[in-house]
Amino acid sequence: MSGLRFSGPRRFDIACLGRLAVDLYAQQVGSRLEDVASFAKYLGGSSANIAFGVARLGLKSAMISRVGDEQMGRFLVETLQREGCDTSQVQVDPERLTGLVLLGLKDRDTFPLLFVRENCADMAIDASRISEDFIAGCRALLITGTHLSTPTVRAASMVALAHAGKHGAVRVLDIDYRPVLWGLTRRGEGANRYVADAAVTARLQELLPQFELLIGTEEEFLIAGGVPGDLLASLRRVREVTPAALVVKLGARGCCFIDGAVPARLEDAPTVVGERIEVMNILGAGDAFAAGLLTGFLRGEDFHGAARIANACGAIVVSRHACAPAMPTPAELAHWFSGRRLPKVDADPVLAHLHRTTPNRAEWPVLHVMAFDHRSQFEAMAREAGAPLTKLPALKQLLLRAADDTGKRHALQGQFGVLIDERYGIDALHTATGRGLWVGRPVEQPGSRPLAFDGTRSIGTALVSWPREQVVKCLVNSHPDDEAELRVAQEERLLELWEATRASGHELLLELIAPGGDDAAVLRSVKRFYNLGLKPEWWKLAPMRSGAWPTLATLITERDPQCRGVVLLGLNQPMERLVEGFAAATHPIVRGFMVGRTIWGEASREWLAGAIDDAALVERVASRFGHLITAWRDTRRPAR
């Protein structure tokens, strides 16, 4: 890599300038775009995908672009931030909307695209707001070809390139040729990857000397070189105007590296063969490749090492729906290169589990949850008090207010949550969602044994309408010595739920109660569920003797190191008994508690009977919740 010299550590490894838009991917595979009924929303735009992918692989990336001052713009910025990508240089446009792309998956070779980018925000990026100081803090700057296509984005790109050149950042061009975005095709021909055009070639070649690395497909180097149908001749034309290193993407054949004179035959260039996999969706493969390649280079890998990472990233992404969310994590790549992966990518359960659990996600190192997802218990309380069931939704709103008050009093931001049902708590559930709380929602039919789902015969269908942040909570009364017919029926429902949550993207909390069982029965049941392939993100268990927790922790670590941990349930125990359970459960695998009636039972009965008003209910419930939180913290304080 004689032409590539990355600086030492700086604030950022790479900044990506270019498209930042919303991708709307068809959920019906095999449909024409005209016939698609629903879409999944993801972060998109080639530069944004690369910035996202590099951040996911553990480097410090930044995005330079522009979004609209609206919901889609905020979605993109928040998505990048969650992945660890800096967004301080993403401008907000007060007038223009964020760009959109609609993408279809018709068959293995047909992927229709419709760019909805008329006067969109990222094509109006303000060159005067490109910060020299910021770019000076980056080891590399990547620009994609779309942002050389119009005067406004070209001016911004030139300013950024000048700053990068002045401060020794390696300048990278991902040619990313989209003829429709250069105005060369009809609007509906977004999937067209190549149209020869001398004017486009000339405009590219004007700026090629300012780059140290060019990345492109064979078609993209044809447009950069300007010799239609002759790749080697086009590469030689490119070499005439720039000494940049060239990485030519060859699809399933891999990629090659030209860091000097163009060879007589492409096969004579250093080449790393691609991965053989079954393609679901080629859209975004090039962005994944670039993210992997640049991650390798920035970590000091030579071409062969970087290309190996790049090819793996591209192969993984083409086997999945979407682009940015499909990007692999370091843990996925470690499994990919371990020699233990399955040939069919989407059939590898280890890779799928790592993809769900190892990307950046909200952390809950401690979790204090007030559970009021009860249904039959609230109905019984209302009957006893002579109150109509229509009062229960208001009661659950008041309980949410009590939880909020407790969170503020005890500074619990990022450490508390609620469990709420939809039968009587749907308004409270909607209120709680989207505010940074941990929010759980039950699916089990109360008291069912064998397990049945509440209000639906198809849990997968029900989860389609759930916000992704809501955790699916399922209580199952199960004992390892249950009769075979009962055990099989319960396990079938749990496997159905497991598969549904894997498809929907929801986390799963499995609440396990062993009727009449002891600690040994609970441990055997947990092991049995792992044997079935179930790996819930959370376990909710009754307090056990202190000696049982290390055994459970060993089991969880062996079977699912990505498990978030265990929370303790209450079972309407007196406060004193719960505190005793907290004291016996100080093992780190126990992350918190989810308690209900012990907190709100008595006050709710009195409220339903008209004995106390709203304010008194909220205060009493908040006080008891706060007492439990204090008790939990006390059991975790180091002994003096």
Image (cartoon, rainbow, N blue to C red):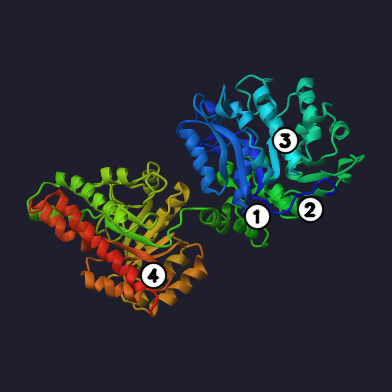
Three-letter code for the amino acid on which mark 3 is drawn: Leu
Disc 2 is placed on an element classified as helix
Label 1 or label 4, whichever comes before in sequence order: 1
Q: CA distance from mark 1 to mark 4?
A: 32 Å
User: How far from the left and from the top, in percent, is residue 76?
Assistant: 52, 38
Q: The disc labelled 1 sits on which kind of residue?
A: Pro
Mark nearest the camera among 3 and 2 is 3
Classify 430 as above or below 353.
Answer: above
How far apart are labels 2 and 1 at the CA level? 22 Å
Tag 3 and tag 4, C-beta contact below 8 Å? no
- The residue under label 4 is 525
Q: Quadrant of residue 540?
A: bottom left
Reading the image, the residue beneath label 3 is 161
Give residue 128's position: percent from left, percent from top.
63, 29
Q: x, y (%) of residue 328?
A: 60, 51
Q: Earlier in the sequence, mark 3 or mark 1?
A: 3
Please, is residue 512 above or below residue 384 in the view?
A: below
Q: Residue at x 60, y 54 (%)?
A: 329
- Crowding at dot 1, Cα within 10 Å, few <14 / some 14-19 / many 20+, comes out as few
State the mark number for residue 343. Answer: 1
Task: Give above or below for 314 relative to 157.
Answer: below
Element marked by disc 4: helix
Q: Which residue is mark 2?
A: 304
